[in-house]
Image: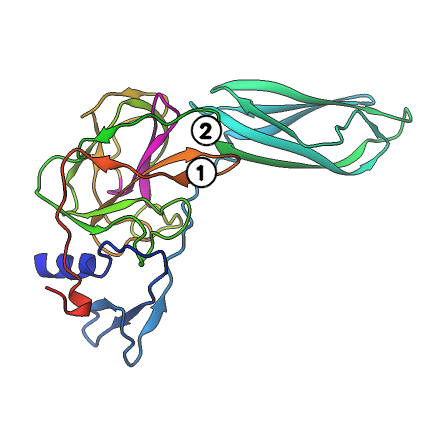
Amino acid sequence: MLARLLFFCGLVMASTTAVAMTIYKSTNADGVVSYSDRPSKGAQVFVFRDRMEEHLERQVYLDIKKQKGLDVVYVRNDLYAPVEVELSFAGLSNVKGAPGQPIRRVLPARSNSRLALLTAITGGKPLVYTPKFEYSLGDPAEAAQSYRYPLPWRGGPFRLSQGANGQYSHYGPKNRYAMDIAMPEGTPIIAARGGVVVKTENGQNGRGNDPSGNFVRVLHDDGTMGVYLHLQKGSVSVREGQRVAVGSPLALSGNTGNSSGPHLHFVVQRNTGLGLVSIPYQFVQPMGVLPNFALGKQ
């Protein structure tokens, strides 16, 4: 089992380039799945996309209150974190009061804000328009502070299986500076920095529907966010809105979502303007790197 874990993780070892590596997935007659950077008969390209997405539609949304000849447009933020929003209108007919330029604003956590007041040009006729609404977690005005992260797990020692700019999957903006740490499923995962739990997922089994698998997202006091991914189903022990300190138990490591094998994917992100991007960070102590067994490097 350990050899298989090392083989999986060796495929995704740290890299210094930002060019995606092509990985091939094959299954032998015994049903054993293998991954390699070299094609073989019957192998298929394994596609790993930078699709780290939280579904916030029910927590950040437009709330339009209609009265006779009047539409009051609110944005509601039910998250325990600020959210940057942008609102514009298209396809206007019989509408007065729609702004000519998009409205961009940062809504505080757990807030409701009126962004527009639309009235009918001709009374008795309906207002016709199409709102375009975008949002992103976090406040882009926050300035990230220098911080060295304690290791976010108990046990080990474990090794890095893919680091910043890793060819396998760490080349998109949300994950470029992420680190993957190979570890057995069930390893205790702890908070590497204090903050407020913003979002969790706890019910995904195996690959599921979310590439992130089960996860915990923590908002730090400087506006950055630490995200712990691919956690074991049912193991998340914190709730949204809960404040955690360094070392607080969060969950157990797993192998859920778009995961190549048992590991913890840890990334630090911030909003840079209607979009989350990963940012560089360092652990308080150096980590060893797994060899790339697929390439024959020992």
Magenta residues?
Answer: 213-233
Mark identifier at residue 138: 2
Give x and y (percent) for residue 129: 77, 36
Question: What element does badge 1 sit on?
Answer: strand
Question: Is residue 174 positioned above or below 238 on the image?
Answer: below
Q: Does residue 214 show up magenta in the picture?
A: yes
What type of secondary structure mainly makes up the magenta span? Answer: strand
Mark identifier at residue 298: none
For this orientation, the residue located farthest to the bottom is 41
Q: Is residue 249 visible?
A: yes
Lateral position of residue 121 relative to residue 28, left or right: right
Give x and y (percent) for residue 252: 20, 38
Name the amino acid type tagged 1: Leu
Seen from the viewer's position, the closer of residues 185 and 181 is: 181
Label 1: how many Cα within 10 Å (few below 14, some 14–19, many 20+): many
Q: Earlier in the sequence, mark 1 or mark 2?
A: 2
Lateral position of residue 297 relative to residue 35, left or right: left
Residue on which disc 1 sits: 276
**Toward which corner of the image does residue 100 lie, by quadrant?**
top right
Seen from the viewer's position, the closer of residues 64 and 273 is: 273
Label 2: how many Cα within 10 Å (few below 14, some 14–19, many 20+): many
Q: Disc 1 to disc 2, how far (Cα)?
A: 8 Å
Question: Is residue 184 positioned above or below 72 on the image?
Answer: below
Q: Is residue 1 visible?
A: no
